[in-house]
Every structure is written in structure tokens, then in C-alpha cells.
Image: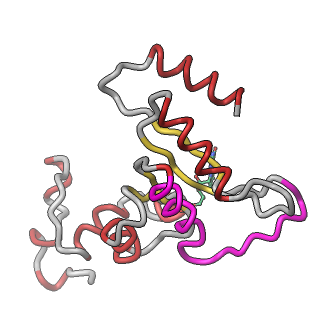
């Protein structure tokens, strides 16, 4: 852990105290004798101690023969364990793509935040669609408001 902890200490020293500092860590590397979630918990505890505010828990294909059990939420249990055992806010990531799936992870206390990568590459307006699906209002730039569904004639409704 020495190298990343030294890097974080250097970053924290210059990053404003009132701005959050997060770090992405490996929850498991799926390799025999490799990084396990207990290692991630120990690392997260050390990061918390030196002023990291949250960790994003992913998992790594660090070696070619890693056998990764990919599926929806497949890395969320790592975020959940780190949150519970290291007592640090966590962000879950990895095959989170549906609004209700994302919402459930936070609502059920498995993570404090979720991160989406490919879903956002596929649809950069994912958050707006998710807000609509979950019945929430989000701010839009004024020039986009004219495109909001409620401003469209019913015949043009898309969903
Ligand atoms: C084009 C692309 C680039 C990525 N680059 C990085 C990266 O630089 N660092 C990193 O930690 N993860 C990177 N990732 C992984 C994503 O951050 C994310 O963890 C992964 O895609 C799983 O989330 P998803 O199922 O929502 O896509 C990248 C993913 C994609 C698709």
C-alpha cells in the first residue's frame, strides 16, 4: 500500500479541505492468491485515515487468466463490504445500467453512490431518462427545456 498511500497524502496536502477526495480501488482481482475483498477493506481503512472521503470499488483483470464472474451488479458486493467494514462512503460500479437497479443499490445501503460508464457512453442523457423513470425532477439548461416531454404535443411522446 505504501506507494498509493504516499500519492494520496501528497494529493490531500494540496487539495482543498472542503473538496471531497475519492479514490478508485480494487475490490478483488479474481486471481488465485491475488487481491481479495479483505485487502480492499484494509486499504480503504488506511485511505480513510489519511483523509480520503470515499472509495469507488471496482475489480481488476490484472492477469490474463483471471476468471471474472461478470453480471449485473457483479462488483457491488465489494463496495458493500468495504462500506460496512471500513466505514467509509463507497461508490459501486460495474454493469449498473437500469434506473431502478441503480436506485436500489443506494436505497438498500449497499453503496452511497453509483457510477455508470458504458450506459452513459451509450446515452449521455441517461440521468434525465432515469429521473423521468423514477419520477424525479432534474434541472435542465433553459435551452433544453423546450425539448422536455411535458412541452411536447402528446402525439410526440416517446415513452
Ligand atoms: C472506454 C472506457 C474507458 C475506461 N477507462 C477507465 C479508466 O481509465 N480507469 C478506470 O478505472 N476504469 C476505466 N473504465 C472502466 C469504467 O470506469 C467502469 O468501471 C467499467 O466500464 C464498468 O462499469 P460499466 O459496467 O458501467 O461500464 C473504462 C471503461 C470504458 C468503457
- Magenta segment boundaries in residue numbering: 63-85
Residue 109 is situated, as x and y percent measured from the top left of the image, at 36, 66
133 vs 3, left or right, is left
Q: Tell me which corner region of the image, top left, top right, bottom left or bottom right, holds residue 72.
A: bottom right
Q: Is residue 23 left or right of residue 65?
A: left
Does 131 lie within the magenta span? Answer: no
- Give the colouring mode of the picture: secondary structure
Q: At x 81% / y 70%, what residue is drawn? A: 67
Taking the view exactly as shown, the residue that stands out farthest to the right is: 65
Front-most of 24 and 138? 24
Residue 81 part of the magenta-drawn span:
yes
Of 4 and 150, nearer the camera is 4
Residue reaching furthest to the top: 14
Percent x, y for residue 117? 52, 57
The image quarter in which residue 71 lies:
bottom right
Vertical placement of 100 versus 18: above or below?
below
Locate the N terminus and report the quarter of the image it occupies: top right
Q: Which residue is drawn at 71% across and 27% down?
A: 3
**Residue drawn at the location 16% of the way across and 85% of the way down:** 155
**What x and y, as percent, mark residue 115?**
46, 56
The residue lying at 52 percent from left, 55 percent from top is 82
Foreground residue among 62 and 150:
62
Indicate the position of residue 119 as horizontal and vertical percent values. 49, 65
Count of numbered tags: 0
Q: Quadrant of the C terminus?
A: bottom left
Above-or-below relation of 114 to 40? below
Q: Is residue 80 above or below residue 157?
A: above
Amino acid at each position: 500500500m505504501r506507494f498509493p498511500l504516499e500519492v494520496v497524502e501528497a494529493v490531500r496536502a494540496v487539495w482543498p479541505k472542503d473538496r471531497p477526495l475519492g479514490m478508485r480501488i480494487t475490490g478483488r482481482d479474481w486471481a488465485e492468491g491475488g487481491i481479495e475483498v479483505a485487502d480492499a477493506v484494509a486499504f480503504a481503512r488506511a485511505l480513510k485515515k489519511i483523509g480520503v472521503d470515499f472509495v469507488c470499488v471496482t475489480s481488476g483483470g490484472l492477469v490474463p487468466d483471471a476468471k471474472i464472474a461478470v453480471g449485473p451488479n457483479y462488483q457491488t458486493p465489494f463496495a458493500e463490504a468495504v462500506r460496512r467494514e471500513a466505514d467509509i462512503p463507497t461508490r459501486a460500479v460495474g454493469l449498473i445500467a437500469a434506473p431502478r437497479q441503480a436506485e436500489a443499490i443506494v436505497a438498500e445501503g449497499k453503496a452511497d453512490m453509483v457510477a455508470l460508464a458504458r450506459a452513459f457512453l451509450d446515452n449521455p442523457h441517461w440521468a434525465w431518462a432515469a429521473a423521468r423513470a423514477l419520477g424525479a425532477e432534474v434541472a435542465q439548461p433553459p435551452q433544453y427545456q423546450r425539448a422536455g416531454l411535458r412541452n411536447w404535443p402528446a402525439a410526440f411522446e416517446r415513452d
